[in-house]
Amino acid sequence: MKLRLQKRMYFIPAGCIAFILFFTVFGDKGLLRIYELKQDKSKIDSRLSETKVENEHLKREIMALKSDRRYLESIARKDFGLVRSNEIIYQFPQEKKQP
């Protein structure tokens, strides 16, 4: 009888420890969740740095469009095909590739 009681006394602390370990690893604030959150944070940080770089590029482009006439002219020429009044445009027929 005493032997059975002693065996049961080992199962109670072991069960408590198993319960605590389970929730430490798999719980809502467990180790796996912390690992997932760190991965998400690193992805968000990298996306943030990319967005900051793109934002700086766009700010420089805005400033150039507001203040640099040559840049504005190059954009107008490239995107809209605009030319100056004294320029002559030569258009050549495109050659077809022979198979």
Image (spheres, grey):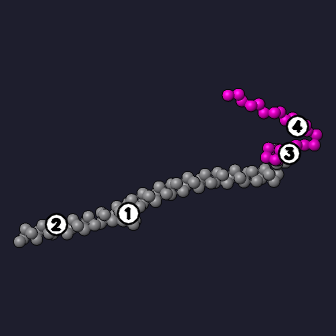
Percent x, y of residue 48: 59, 55
Label 1 or label 3, whichever comes before in sequence order: 1
What residue does disc 3 label? 82
**Distance between mark 3 and mark 2 Cα atoms:** 88 Å
Callout 3 secondary element: loop
Label 1 or label 4, whichever comes before in sequence order: 1
Percent x, y of residue 81: 83, 44
Q: Is residue 20 above or below residue 53?
A: below
Callout 1 secondary element: loop
Residue name at image x 46 percent, y 59 percent: 37
The residue type indicated by label 3 comes to Leu
Q: Main secondary structure of the magenta part?
A: loop
What residue does disc 4 label? 89
Quarter of the image with the C terminus is top right
Tell whether 22 sits left or right of 44: left
Nearest-to-viewer mark from 1 and 4: 4
- Asked if the residue at tag 2 contacts the one at tag 4, i.e. Cβ–Cβ closer than 8 Å, the answer is no
Please tell me the numbered disc located at residue 10. 2
Q: Is residue 61 magenta?
A: no
The residue type indicated by label 4 comes to Ile
Residue numbers of the magenta segment:
75-99
Please tell me the numbered disc located at residue 30. 1
In this view, which residue lies farthest toward the right? 86
**Distance between mark 4 and mark 3 Cα atoms:** 10 Å
